[in-house]
Image: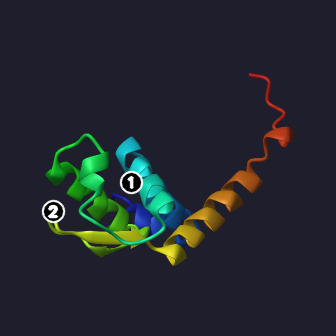
Amino acid sequence: MKNNKKEIFKGESLKLAEFAKAVSHPARIEILKILAEKNSCICGEIVLEIPLAQSTVSQHLKELKSAGLIAGEIDGPRSCYCLNAEGIAVMRRLFEGLFAVIETDNIKCKC
């Protein structure tokens, strides 16, 4: 019987993995940075700042929206979007929790 990751892993670990997947592409990281720098809703401007096809940028935006990191309408060149403050705050808290657990000062392995 094959185990489903959603059955094995619950709660914060699963959500953290979803966030990690959402930010696992450099274009998505750049999109988040652009939105953070603008600090307002953006309509269709991302395509001008990222050297990728409009359809590719739209796919990256959909991934970020699916993870709850951005909000807005993402459908073609007239799309409007912005950071989702709540989603960003949850991602930050979960990553900070992970890094607190794996504090590098406490690593004793010399392999």
Q: Is residue 48 left or right of residue 96?
A: left
Instruction: Please state which of residues 61 and 20 is positioned toward the viewer in this rendering.
Output: 61
Quadrant holding the C terminus? top right
- Considering only vertical position in the picture, is 14 above or below 55? below
Q: Position of residue 42 (x, y in %)?
A: 33, 67
Instruction: Please state which of residues 69 and 44 is positioned toward the viewer in this rendering.
Output: 44
Note whether residue 58 is visible.
yes
**Identity of the residue drawn at 15% across and 62% down:** 77
Residue beneath disc 1: 31
| Mark whose residue sits in front, 2 or 1 | 2
Residue beneath disc 2: 77
The quadrant in which residue 34 appears is bottom left
- Counting residues from the start of the chain, the first of labels 2 and 1 encountered is 1
Callout 2 secondary element: loop
The quadrant in which residue 6 appears is bottom left
- Considering only vertical position in the picture, is 28 above or below 9? above
Instruction: Please state which of residues 107 and 28 is positioned toward the viewer in this rendering.
Output: 28
Amino acid at the residue labelled 2: Pro
Pointer 1 local density, CA inside 10 Å: few below 14, some 14–19, many at least 20:
many
Q: What colour scheme does the image use?
A: rainbow
Q: Position of residue 64 (x, y in %)?
A: 36, 62
Instruction: Please state which of residues 22 and 108 is positioned toward the viewer in this rendering.
Output: 22
Quadrant holding the N terminus? bottom left
Q: Position of residue 98 (x, y in %)?
A: 67, 56
Q: Is residue 99 left or right of residue 27?
A: right
Callout 1 secondary element: helix
Note whether residue 9 is visible.
no
